[in-house]
Amino acid sequence: MKAKILGKLSIDKNKIKNEISVIEESGFDDAYKEYSIGKWRTKSIWNQNGINGEAISKEYCGHAKRTFFSNQLTYINEIISKNFNTKYIKSVRVLNSCENGMIFPHKDYLEFKKGFNRVHVVLYTDKNCLNSEKDTIYHMRAGEVWYVDGSNIHSAMSLSEKGKFTLIIDFCPDISLEKIFSRNSSVVKDNIEPFVKYDREPLSEDFINSFYLISKTANEKMLPNIMGILNYWHFYYDLSHKDYFKILDKAFLNHENILVSKKYKSSRSMLIESGYVMGQV
Ligand SMILES: [Fe+2]
């Protein structure tokens, strides 16, 4: 697994709870919906122009500005400014996922020249919020600062009602990871063992055959939810991302409903071949 813990921060539960309420009341941005189903929501708080709602990642010269909305997030801005080298930051987004919200297995930066050094800072979570990279399922604990390498296929889901709130900070791709931290950073960089979930049962042939049966009933609107069943199984049964796409290919590449196979092909391309193009899926 290329994802790794860079360190740990202490998060003030009351302060973060208050700012989560501010974010929830203001609503979320419309970005990257094609990658996810259920409650998987993003809010841009630092971006190229400091404009509310610009949540699509961009490669550009210079560093990110706080959005007008984020002036209300005193504590979250303090976490960012105190601990990280802001001159290298390209964007900061708040991610919230809950109530079975999930993101499909995908690769990052396919549409970019270089992409970013992407760091997750977990503000709030519980053990039902899981991430995965290739065949490894892991849980990011509150306060942990993770480097997530998007070049391997990865996915995530949050089963609980409250789910998780994470800062996704994109840094300039040309710097070493040591340089992302400010001189006064209070991130503790001791060796921290990641929380990895090893206890996945094998996925039975009966389950796989039942998936093929359900997939026959699909129309193009149902396709994301049916793909979601298999992503859910990936977290609880021993189903690799390689086999995830193998099963989907068998079910949908030559589906008898041509609209389903067309939608699957463009979704597959966005997820693991050519990356995000607005309006493609
Ligand atoms: Fe990703």
Image (spheres, rainbow, N blue to C red):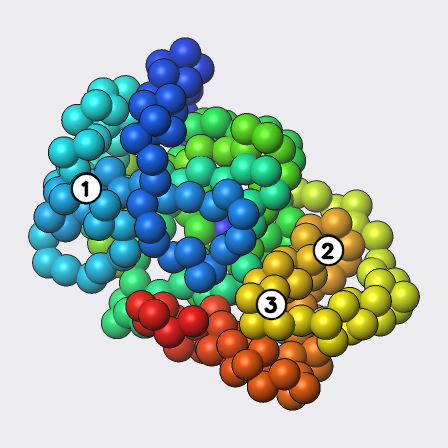
Residue 112: quadrant of the picture: bottom left
Tag shown at residue 52: 1
Residue sitting nearer the eye, 268 or 122: 268
Residue 105's x, y, as percent? Answer: 55, 62
Residue 127 as seen in the image, left or right of residue 177: right
Tag shown at residue 233: 2
Residue 145: quadrant of the picture: top left
Q: Secondary structure at mark 2?
A: helix
Instruction: Check disc 3: other Cα within 10 Å, few if <14, some if 14-19, many if 20+.
Output: some
Residue depicted at x 31% and y 68%: 278
Give the vertical position of 70 relative to 156 (above or below): above
Residue position marked by numbered label 3 in the rendering:
223
Residue sitting nearer the eye, 155 or 25: 25
Residue 95: quadrant of the picture: top left
Nearer the observer: mark 2 or 1; the answer is: 1
- Kind of residue at badge 3: Leu
- Kind of residue at badge 2: Trp
Give the vertical position of 161 relative to 200 (above or below): above
Query: Does the Cβ of the disc 3 residue fall within 8 Å of ligand 1?
Result: no
